[in-house]
Amino acid sequence: IAIAGDLTSAGGITLTPTTDTFLSNGTGLVVGHTGQETVSAGDGATDMVPEVQVLGTAGADSSILVAAFSNTATIAAAPTIHLVKGGHASIGSHAVVTDDEVLGALIFGGDDGTDLESIGAWIKAEVDGSPGTGDLPTRIVMGTSADGAEVPATRLTIDSAGLVAVEGTFSIGGVAVLAQATSGAVGAVELAIASEVNTGTDTTRAITPDAFAGSSAAIRYVVLSVGDPST
């Protein structure tokens, strides 16, 4: 059945096709409204109108459920969402993706009073090396937008080797810690306690773990009892 124009029904519409159902490229599927909303293409400014939209005024009518009912315990029977990036410009054709290419992203945005294009946070997967057949090194990048910004900055990265990098200051047990490379040292990290527990002072104290002998990357674990900054 080919429908060239609008299909309107006062009641429900049940489709029971015996084969796949297709929507032509350039047309969309909108649930819950008569028009589409515009967001940004990941940069807070460039317009993008997603072709599949679920629009509502409450949690239930703006949510998507993907459920699997099976007694198989593996991922093969679990509900999944696949974000896949091809390196070829034609659908169905294949070309390898390249280093630093974004494979997919979860983007969290909000209305800034003008439009829906401001981005508050994202989680991205990026190629982290040279991919090939059966080989796809990837890093996960998490970012948040600072006050006054509409595009996230990187806050945490997990690279293809499993190494975790935290940008700027993070908190351990309520104590703010600034992590940065130590000048002139290979593999060493400087941890600066930005505020002292039990004193309320802003005195900064630096702790520099030394590298293990013969290793260019390992550092010693240092256990601190943070109290009086004079000790």
Image (cartoon, grey):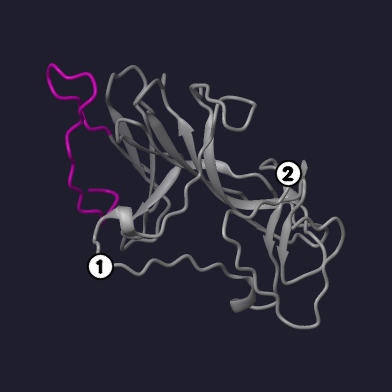
Verify whether residue 186 appears in magenta.
no
Q: Residue furthest right?
A: 5
Residue position for label 1: 71
Report whether residue 147 is seen: no
Q: Is residue 91 visible?
A: yes
Name the residue located 59 percent from the left edge and 24 percent from the top edge: 88
Which residue is at 42% across, 55% downward?
Answer: 80
Q: Does 91 sit above or below residue 95?
A: below
Query: Is residue 225 on the magenta stretch?
Result: yes
Query: Which quadrant, please, contains the N terminus?
Result: bottom right
Amino acid under disc 1: Asn
Q: Nearer the viewer, residue 215 or 222?
A: 215
Residue 101 placed where, x, y %? 53, 28
Is most of the magenta stretch helix, strand or loop? loop
The residue where tag 2 is placed is 25
- Secondary structure beneath dot 1 equals loop
Crowding at dot 1, Cα within 10 Å, few <14 / some 14-19 / many 20+, comes out as few
* Image x and y of residue 40, in percent: 73, 47
Q: Amino acid at mark 2?
A: Asn
In this view, the residue in front, 100 or 96, is 96
Using residue 200 as the reference point, say whether residue 56 is left or right of it.
right
Q: How many marks?
A: 2
**Label 2 or label 1, whichever comes before in sequence order:** 2
31 sits left or right of 108 in the view: right
Mark 2 Cα shell of 10 Å, populated few (<14), some (14-19), many (≥20): few
Bounds of the magenta span? 208-231
How far from the left and from the top, in percent, is residue 33?
A: 77, 70
Q: Is residue 226 above or below residue 125?
A: below
Q: Nearer the viewer, residue 83 or 76?
A: 76
Quarter of the image where one finds residue 211: top left
Most extreme residue toward the bottom is 11
Instruction: Give the answer, above or below, for where 209 lies relative to 16.
Output: above
